[in-house]
Image (cartoon, rainbow, N blue to C red):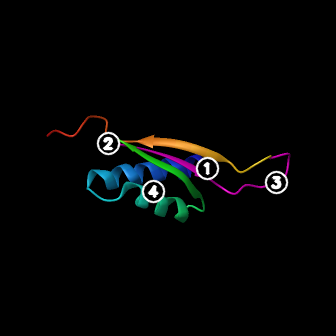
Amino acid sequence: AQSAADLAALAGANALQVSEDACAEASTITARNGATLESCEIAGEDVTVTVRVEGPRWLGQPGDPVAEARAGPTEPRPD
């Protein structure tokens, strides 16, 4: 779940930098990794996503693995 969240956040942040729909891009990447985008938030130039992956129900696993990731530029874009 964490890898899917990391990739989705990076894709969203990249899309945001080129004036594209960050959450749509994050959703596309999440789906390509076999996961579901639970939430996508944009704050300034940062994108934070929460991703859920359908997990096994063995060994006492009570639910699906969920992960969160944030991505954005290391420095603000110059005006």
First to last magenta residue range: 45-61
Residue 52 x, y percent position in the rendering: 62, 52
The amino acid type of the residue labelled 1 equals: Ala
Q: Which mark is residue 45?
A: 2
**Earlier along the polypeptide chain: callout 1 or callout 3?**
1
> Tag 2, which secondary structure?
loop
Q: Amino acid at mark 2?
A: Glu
* Horizontal and vertical percent position of residue 69: 50, 42
State the quadrant of the C terminus.
top left
Number of residues whose C-alpha sits closer than 10 Å to that of mark 2, classed few (under 14), some (14–19) or many (20 or more): some
Q: What kind of element bears circle 4?
A: helix
For numbered disc 3, what is the local secondary structure? loop
**Sequence-earlier tag: 2 or 1:** 1
29 vs 71: above or below = below
Q: Nearer the viewer, residue 27 or 11?
A: 27
- Using a 10 Å C-alpha cutoff, classify the residue at mark 4 as few (fewer than 14 neighbours), some (14 to 19) or many (20 or more): many
Residue 33, given in percent of the width and then of the height, sits at 56, 61
Q: Which residue is mark 3?
A: 57
- Reading the image, the residue beneath label 1 is 1
Residue on which disc 4 sits: 26
Are circles 4 and 3 on residues that touch, CB within 8 Å? no
CA distance separating discs 2 and 1: 23 Å
Q: Who's the residue at 36% across and 49% down the image? A: 13
- Number of marks in the image? 4
Q: CA distance from mark 3 to mark 2?
A: 37 Å
Mark before the other along the chain sequence, 1 or 4: 1
Picture quadrant of residue 57: bottom right
